[in-house]
Image: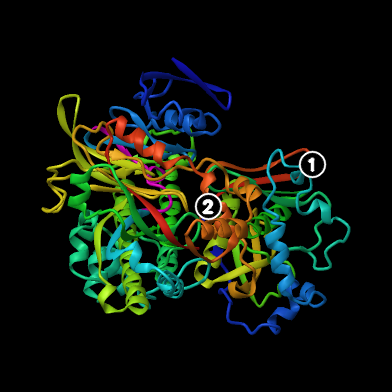
Amino acid sequence: MSTSTVTGQRIELVEETPYRWRIDRAGPMRVPGVVFASHRLLPELAGDQSLAQVVGVATLPGIVRAAYAMPDMHSGYGFPIGGVAATDIDEGGVVSPGGVGFDISCGVRLLLSDLSRADLAGQRLNRLMDALDRLIPRGLGRGAVWRLSRRDELDALLTGGSRYAVERGHGEPGDLAHCEDQGAVADADPAQVSERAMARGLGQVGSLGSGNHFLELQVVESVYDPALADAFGLTRGRVCVMIHCGSRGLGHQICSDHVQAMLRAMPRYGISVPDRQLACAPVTSPEGQRYLGAMAAAANYGRANRQLLTAATRTAFRRALGDAHSRLDLLYDVSHNLAKIETHTVDGRERRLCVHRKGATLALPPGHPGLPADLRPHGQPVLVPGSMGTASHVLAGVPGAEAFHSTCHGAGRLLSRHAAMRRIHGRTLREQLTAAGVAVRAASERGLAEEAPFAYKDVDEVVTTCERAGLARRVARLVPIGVVKG
Amino acid sequence: MSAQPTGDINQDQPRGDAGQDQPGGKVRQDQPRGDARQDQSRGDPRQDQSRGDPRQEQPRGDARREAASPDAGWARAGGPTPPGAGHRALPHPADLVVEAWAPTLPACLAQAVLGLVDTFADGAGVPASGRHQFALPAAPADEQLVALLNEVIFVVDVAAAVPVAARVSPDGDGGFAVELATAPVEAVPVVGPAPKAVALSGLRAEQTGTGWVCRALVDV
């Protein structure tokens, strides 16, 4: 047994395997907590609020099996980032906007080029990076690829997601098959999106934003599972593009609006929570349904956002390298901040669950009907962006994964932005990255410093832990050769 | 609760015109804009204040007590601050914490606006060219704090305008009238990621022995 004390609250972690730790039920907890972490990752949890947040999540009405935490877990608000919680809809289970997070449908897509690293020798990489620099909007007030002028256009996008973007000429039909939910979540209800959220959304379709969001040129460096890598098209040396961003101001506003609505409603349902950011309401309640309708709309916005950036990336490839090298095929697009209505077997019977993944990625196993036919035999590609300048990973869903087909979503933050900035200046970091062969196009040097690689956990350790905990299988490791960020 | 706009986001006012009678513009008159300011903000980021860091002991505001504001009730980015008032940013594993303090709640709220802006923009000496006014209805102080900061985030996101000064005045009914003097985002050096939302975890707006303290966790 190992113990960890969090802000005066002593939380005992019981080691069940070297990669799975249990927090036993106590007090108002309805289920235990389960933390997937290695011995190396575990001490990094002791310094923040994340274990206490797992305990808080375990108190939610209707939660089943456990409050789960992925190996990249760190402190969030209410929910930990890297948390998974499923509630039983037919037994009063709740939906919590905080369990999805502010950046609804924040996620990742990976595009496969037909280039190898050698094809970007000489000035070709810089030419491509300069084109991306011009065409990828990012940072504060830098516009967007597609500025919508009318509310009805935004309504259509909120309903149609990537599908609407492709129909309007921003992409290829083939892009949709490899998107989670084929590019659009059903049951989106734009009527539940406030005017403020709409106002924030109109001018940001096709923009990275700032913070930890990025577009990277990457090269497949290592292959762990040759058969799966081959099925996914991840041959060594292949140049890929990873895009990490979400639903921008619109998603954040929806979260804020509906947290407030649920706070007002909770007394009516007899619900109390240990942290206001855990505000929730029964999935079947009017408040729950309104949030899910708005959340689905934001999810579609997030997918359309990544679709627009895909279209801009293709334009950059075409302008920098010519038509012959502009082909970019979508391997997959998946969210890591979302709640989904799913059916799982719990305690021997099938149940309709509302599965919250906040900083956790869906990882469907081989044979799952939610996968497109060509990926179904292999399992879902899981895209795990690492810290800037280190590595990212592609994993695959596996059968029998415990946490409702979920796995990690990234490296997981270790140092605060302040601490990162105190350790390195953005200019120094840029020089180090350049010396390491990574071309950087950043909106601000401070933004670079905040995302310094040492501010994050070791992504290799995180994905290895996922594999050993039975959450996913490692397929390939990708390293960056170009970073575009806000 | 949410803020209730009482005036349009006025980002289109010509620079140096309407801005002349606004506090941001007045400070600007004897501080010519220069690229050097941008270099300073990079080399000595004010947000580099955290627990355990000696610089935390010199939070913004208290170090600037020497001059009283000539603009009654306005708190300006980079401007003089009344005694006992100020703001700072504190670290959080993922995002940012903004903390403000002042002898009165309205002054504390105005400092919170500047504290939030400080996390992503250096508005010191930048002339205001727009104004955004809204009402904070009577409510618990922490709800007013959230509504206020959310309004700032909204203005930045939608109007691409950065508040460089704030005035919070009691409306006599438990609420406040808020005025933000703004500058276009392209006129303000951006020094950090844009704020996107205010979390309710750890939210604080309360009276202490010496005045008021506000604290909010901001998602970026």
> What type is the residue that disc 2 sits on?
Glu
Residue at 43% x, 47% y is A259
Q: Secondary structure at mark 1?
A: loop
Examine the image and state in which quarter residue A407 appears. Answer: top left
Q: Nearer the viewer, residue A344 or A408?
A: A408
Numbered-mark total? 2
- Name the chain under label 1: B
Task: Report, in whole angstroms, how far the alpha carbon at label 1 lies from the one at label 2.
Answer: 38 Å
Q: Nearer the viewer, residue B173 or A187?
A: A187
The magenta-colored residue range is A91-104
**Residue A318: x percent and y percent?**
32, 77
Q: Secondary structure at mark 2?
A: loop
**Residue A36: x percent and y percent?**
37, 30
Residue A246 shown in magenta: no
Residue at 58% x, 81% y is B12
Examine the image and state in which quarter residue A412 appears. Answer: top left
Residue at 40% x, 43% y is A265
Q: Which residue is mark 2?
A: A451
In the image, residue A281 above or below residue B132: above
Image side of residue A471 versus residue B139, left or right: left
Q: Nearer the viewer, residue B48 or A117?
A: A117
Can residue B91 be seen? yes
**Residue A344: x percent and y percent?**
19, 35
The mark lying in front, picked from 1 and 2, is 2
In the image, residue B151 above or below residue B129: above
- Name the chain under label 2: A
> What type is the residue that disc 1 sits on?
Thr
Q: Which residue is mark 1?
A: B210
Residue A93 shown in magenta: yes
In the image, residue B186 above or below residue B46: below
